[in-house]
Amino acid sequence: MNNNQNNNHIPMQEYPFDYERYINEQLRQIDDLDERRFAKEILLKGLGSIIRQTEQKYMDLEKRIYEEIEIPDSQYSVVSTVIERRHYDPTNETLFPVDMLDLQEETQREQLSDKKLRYVRTVFVRGNNRLCRSLEETGKIYGSIMVGVEKQRAEFVIRPAQRYRNKVEQLYQMFLDNYISWKTVNTAYLDKFYDLYMAVDEAEKVHLENDNFMEEIEFERGEYAGAVLSGMIPLWNIEEMKFESTNFMIPCIDGIYYEHEFRIEEEKQKDGYLIQKNGDILEIRHENGRIMLKSPRETFSDWVSVRLVQGEMVRSLDYKAPFLSNREKDTFLKRLTNQSGVRLMTKSDLFRRVLELDVEEYIELVDCAVLDGCEREIIEPKMNWFAGEELFPRKGRSILLLSFREKEQGYYLNDSMAEFVVSRMQMEMNEYRCAGELRT
């Protein structure tokens, strides 16, 4: 059975037996040409026809079984990218700002400033995790800013852009409230955003509050030169929407409670929907084409829902950065494993699970080993920081070390991709302390 682009499933027979070649090879052993011709007529046209029909029946059976097995939670994949803010396309209905505040500069400056520090800019560090850690440990970065037509040297305080991490944490809580299984979100881009601040007295010296302050910020030469980019914002495939009771049909009365129906449009039912729980929502129940909300309130307003857009993301003009996702490849073995609920704790199964993740353009799993301890620097699972510590601390467990090979040596996202894989495996394998390393 040959794999082709029209079939999404993986053939059960990985190395098909070429019966035509085998028959022709055996026919060569017949010296008499008339007998060889007669045998070829019977074997290739007669037996060959039976073999082809049998193979086709097995392929049809495999496809039918494959399509009958559904992947749970397949409507809730998260995709992200980064763009220059000036290139944001509001007509793109597949990608939205992680934080809408990024589109409101003045409001953003007011909300992120305090009595000691004035918010200046958010920057994206196009560097590996080592460079990001170096910036965090230093806590400061030097450069120059344009005030009117004059360039002035400035010292900036740099801090991780916590608001993006808060958005991921809120999303995790919504998954829990909606009883949807959580799949580790690839936060490689979000973890590389930092907020720049200036001390209040320094900001007053350069008249930071005035309209003369310009966008241009130049950072001093060094390892950060060219890696710290200003004017960037992250996007993802999650649209946040507010709704009210007038959006619904007549609520169903159940004693002293009301059941409100959140109906999903037919053309959008391929997307995933979540309702943000609040004090007035007692129960969230997902049904076919709708979400039922139980509440003591008959009317309400400003409740929040989010839509996770699925399918192919639209790449608007100048959306150049790669799309990162937590999607899994759709394979027969994956569907079968999900249906049975049995996970094989074998090396080959671990490799299969890693291969299903959307990281193949960056890294490749080449080896794994169980260690009692590890002295060298390793990649820790940090993308599920909000999930909390398990019942038994990870420090006392054996280390499952995943070794990766970089597809493009030194690419700035490679170690983040390894961190994503390790974080994902840690959520599924609590008996080990998962870690990773990049091999040269």
Image: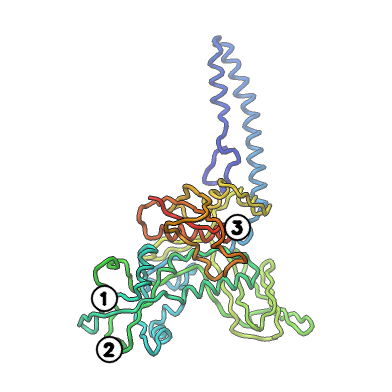
Q: Residue furthest toward the left?
A: 150
Disc 3 versus disc 1: nearer the observer: 3
* Rendered image quadrant of residue 16: top right
- The residue carrying pointer 1 sits among few (fewer than 14), some (14 to 19) or many (20 or more) residues within 10 Å by Cα, namely some
Query: Sequence order check: which comes first, mark 2 or mark 3?
Result: 2
What residue sits 58% from the left and 19% below the top?
40
Disc tally is 3
Residue 182 picture location, percent across and down: 59, 65
Viewer-proximal residue among 144 and 381: 381
Residue 42 picture location, percent across and down: 63, 20
Residue 237 picture location, percent across and down: 50, 67
Q: Are marks 3 and 1 in contact (CB under 8 Å)?
A: no
Rendered image: mark on residue 143: 1
- Dot 2 falls on a residue whose secondary structure is loop
Is residue 62 shown above or below 130? Answer: above
Rounded to the nearest angstrom, the CA distance separating label 2 from label 3 is 56 Å
Name the residue carrying label 2.
207
Q: Are marks 1 and 2 in contact (CB under 8 Å)?
A: no
Name the residue carrying label 3.
431
Q: Amino acid at mark 3?
A: Glu
What residue sits 67% from the left and 80% below the top?
281
Residue 12 seen from this side:
yes
Viewer-proximal residue among 77 and 317: 77
Residue 262 picture location, percent across and down: 65, 75
What residue sits 41% from the left and 57% below the top?
414
Is residue 73 shown above or below 177? Answer: above
Q: Amino acid at mark 2?
A: His
Rounded to the nearest angstrom, the CA distance separating label 3 from label 1 is 47 Å
Query: Sequence order check: which comes first, mark 3 or mark 1?
Result: 1
